[in-house]
Each structure stands twice: as structure tokens, then as C-alpha cells.
Image (cartoon, grey):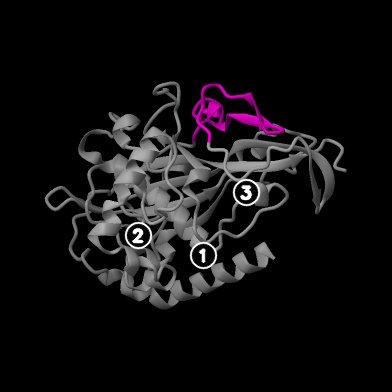
Amino acid sequence: MKHHISRWIAVGLCFIALLQAPSYAQAPGLEGAPDTAQSCTGKFPNLINDICWSCMFPLRIAGANFISMSQEDENFGASNSPVCSCSNPPRVGVPVAFWEPVRMVEVVRKPMCFPTLGGADLPNPVGAPRGLRKSVDSYAFYHVHWYTAPLMVLLEVLLDYDLCLEKGSLDVAYMTELDPLWNDAELTQLINPDVFLFANPIAQAACAADCVAASAGFPLEQLYWCAGCQGSMYPLTGHIAHASGGVPSSALLMQRMSAKLHRELLVWGTWGQQGTCSNFPIPLMDKRAYKAQLVSPASTEKVDGKCCQPFGRAHQLWGLGKELPLGQQDFSYLVFRKRNCCFSLLGL
């Protein structure tokens, strides 16, 4: 069912993109913008040395912490029972919980530039607008590429049992260059009409609480319109009205893209009691279920014992010194998603 829904949504978005493609050349607010991102550079990440594998922890088995490595966790909605059972496929086992590295997200200024693919620079057939950063009025616009990256399967971490892992290959699953909603705040109201509820000072002031919670631990599920210290999750576009730098801007758009794909039912939940046996649709993303590592430009250097952060955490706590001079580089993140699963070696 999930695959049928996702397929038709993707087909619908592609059809809209083809209808709207000619309007890209006259994108509002971007006419005559200087092309400050002419080059496209990058490298394929080393899946061993460039990945902070400790972000997968804590590992919980039967409701108890088995390995933590001083990593952060938000154990919400999961059962503490030592036994679990599922019907499809049928199995009885023990509940396990960990953080699975499953997605890579690029935030780029040049359309069709793929730093994660070694700086592949492809043609721009639909005339997607180029990125822009203005220091004068603190405005920015970026494109985002969403990769499927089930690293544990790609590296064959578990050879004989992978019911608890997402299968697939490294692939570009979504490009905002082909999505007219990404550049149009009015058109994107088709998928987030609730934006009107939060376009006021009171709702935005509440995001301060989300910022505090994310910086101290994990963000607040109830404030789903907030992206913690990075600002507002809405509108679900690449436009940032109050950009304060490349790192916080890219972190904001990584969160917006995650929320956008949840809203479009292209990303499903894998956590809590409901996710123990199978994925489930959740159009309002639960921010507590995600952590992210800045892969490029960065390293696996740990800050306070951690090199991945919950969504919305203040970038001053983890992102200082990560942006190169003149802000010419793109950004790449590895997203870890909370995974609850009923684990049985026997598959019974």
C-alpha cells in the first residue's frame, strides 16, 4: 500500500513540475540574481571514515539500554515489554531500538549540482532558479537533494537478517529543481494549508521553547511548525527570509525537506509501538525521531562526545567553524532515523 501511494504522489508531482517548468525562468525575487555558485565540486563520502557510526546508539534491547556510547536518545512510544510479535512476516522476538542511517541530504546553490556524487554537474533542462545569498537583507535560497542511503545494508552489516533495516541502494530520490512547490510559497500551500495558523508573532515566538528543548535534548513534538533554533518550518520552500549563515540555513532546509516528504507521504514512520512491525504513514513529522550529522564540509570531530545533533539544535553548539570563507560551499548531511523493530533470528 505504501509503495502504491508513494508512486502516485511522485507521478503527480512530476506532472505538476512539467506544467510549471516554464515559470522557473521568472522566479519571483530571483530575477537578475548574481550567480555566485558557478562551480560544482565535491567528493563521494568515505562510508567508513566520514560517517560517525556512534550516532546509531543508544541500542536498546527489550526496553533496556544495551550500548549507549554516551549518545542521545528519545525513547518515545515504544513498549518496554521484553517480548514482541508481528504478523507480517510472522515472528516472535525481542523489541530493539536504534538510530538507522538511511538518508543523505544535500543543500546546494547551483541547480543540478551533486557534491555527494563527486561534484557531478548536470544540465538544468527546466531552468530551475539558482541559489542566492544576500548579506544585505539576510535572504537565501537553496536547492535540496534527497538521497536514499541505507548504509547498513550497503555495507552488509547484517548478512543474514535485515528485517529491521531499510533495503535499497544509494540513489537520488528527490530533487527540488523538478518541484515547482519548492520555489513558490503560494503553490506549496497545497500541501501545507495550515501555514496560515502559524504566520503570526505568537506562533513564531513559541519556537523559542522548541529551540531551548532541542539545544538541551530533543525538540518538542507539539510545536511541529518550528525548526528549533533555525526558525520556522513553514513555508516548505527553499526561501529563507532571515538567513544567518550557511550552516543554520542548510540545517533549516534539511528539516523542511524532511517535513515536506512526510507531508507528501513519501517518507513514513519507523518508530514507537506502531513502527515495531512495519512502517506507518505520518504526515506530521515527529522531529524527535531524527538526528543528523554534517558530513560536508565537516569531519567526524565530536563536540561534547557527539557528532550528530537532533533537529533544531542551536548551530552555535555544533556548527561553528564549519563554513568556508565567502560561503561558497554546499552542505551535505547524513540523517539518522529512529528505528523500533521486533527482532527474531528465527523469523518466527
| Vertical placement of residue 327 versus 233, above or below | above
Q: Which amino acid is tagged 3?
A: Thr
Q: Quadrant of the N terminus?
A: bottom right
| Residue 239 percent location from the top left of the image | 29, 58
The secondary structure type at the circle numbered 3 is: loop
Labelled pair 3, 2 in contact (Cβ < 8 Å): no
Q: According to the image, label 1 marks what residue?
A: 264
Q: Is residue 109 magenta?
A: no
The secondary structure type at the circle numbered 1 is: loop
Q: Which amino acid is tagged 2?
A: Tyr
Q: Which comes sooner in the sequence, label 3 or label 1?
A: 1
Q: Which amino acid is tagged 1?
A: Glu
The answer to whether residue 126 is left or right of residue 274 is left
The answer to whether residue 344 is left or right of residue 128 is right
Q: Which residues are magenta?
A: 45-73
| Vertical placement of residue 227 versus 59, above or below | below
Residue 312 sits in which quadrant? top left
| Residue 271 percent location from the top left of the image | 61, 46
Report the Cα–Cα distance between label 1 and label 2.
15 Å
Comparing labels 3 and 1, the label whose residue is closer to the camera: 3
Q: Which mark is residue 270?
A: 3
Q: According to the image, label 2 marks what residue?
A: 234
The answer to whether residue 139 is left or right of residue 262 is left
Between residue 331 and residue 97, name the one nearer to us.
97
The residue at 55%/21% (across/down) is 69
Q: Which comes sooner in the sequence, label 1 or label 2?
A: 2
Residue 23 sits in which quadrant? bottom left
The residue at 22%/44% (across/down) is 244
| Residue 339 percent location from the top left of the image | 62, 42
